[in-house]
Image (tube, rainbow, N blue to C red):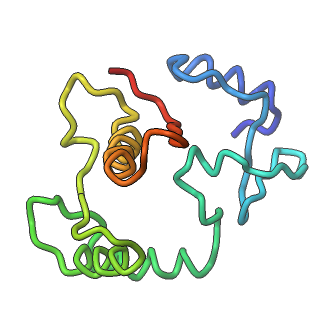
Amino acid sequence: MSNTFDEIQKRENALLCNTYGRYPLAVSKAKDCTLFDLDGDEYLDFLAGIAVCSLGHSRDDIADVMAEQARKMVHVSNLFYQEPQLDLAEKLLSTCAAGKVFSATPAQRPMREPSSWPADTCAKFAMKIVTKSLPLKGRFMAGHFPH
């Protein structure tokens, strides 16, 4: 396996389609919110793994919970009833005034929708709630809305 950044970069260019603009950093490991390059230099992960590692990398407590869950089941479609999904819904609803939780996967989005559908849908849903509960003056909106 390659050790240097240049070797990794050349290897990637030979093996992968260029679908991302990469930062000039080869990450060898990560812990909490810190990324480590091949030389052991540390970097703060402000991207949080593009928002999928917002609780941190390589956390033992999370790894233990994930391993425990993986021994039961890794993923089950929303086409089936699942008690853990209901447990999560109850926890989420206990933190807000919503009456129900909207649960969907990216596979359930219409084909014309962009890959950022989950984030956009959440933002649009939040805006509908805000629009109904706040006057026009003082409202703001953030997010990517392609339509």
Quarter of the image where the C terminus is located:
top left
Q: Residue at x 21, y 37 (%)?
A: 109
Quarter of the image where the N terminus is located:
top right
Which image quadrant is residue 77 in? bottom left
Please determine whether, in this image, residue 89 is positioned above or below residue 23. Answer: below
Please determine whether, in this image, residue 15 is positioned above or below residue 122. Answer: above
Along the line of sight, which residue is nearer the eye, 50 or 119? 119
Q: How many marks?
A: 0
Which image quadrant is residue 138 in? top right
Instruction: Where is residue 12? Give x, y as percent.
Output: 62, 25
Instruction: Where is residue 110? Give x, y as percent.
Output: 18, 31
Q: Residue at x 36, y 45 (%)?
A: 131
Along the line of sight, which residue is nearer the eye, 120 or 10? 120
Instruction: Where is residue 27? Give x, y as percent.
Output: 73, 44
Q: Residue at x 17, y 75 (%)?
A: 82
In the picture provided, is 85 more to the left or to the right than 71? left
Please determine whether, in this image, residue 102 is positioned above or below residue 92. Answer: above
Q: Residue at x 37, y 31 (%)?
A: 115
Please determine whether, in this image, residue 70 is positioned above or below residue 20. Answer: below
Instruction: Where is residue 24? Give x, y as percent.
Output: 78, 28
Along the line of sight, which residue is nearer the eye, 20 or 54? 54
In the picture provided, is 64 more to the left or to the right than 133? right
In the picture provided, is 21 more to the left or to the right than 141? right
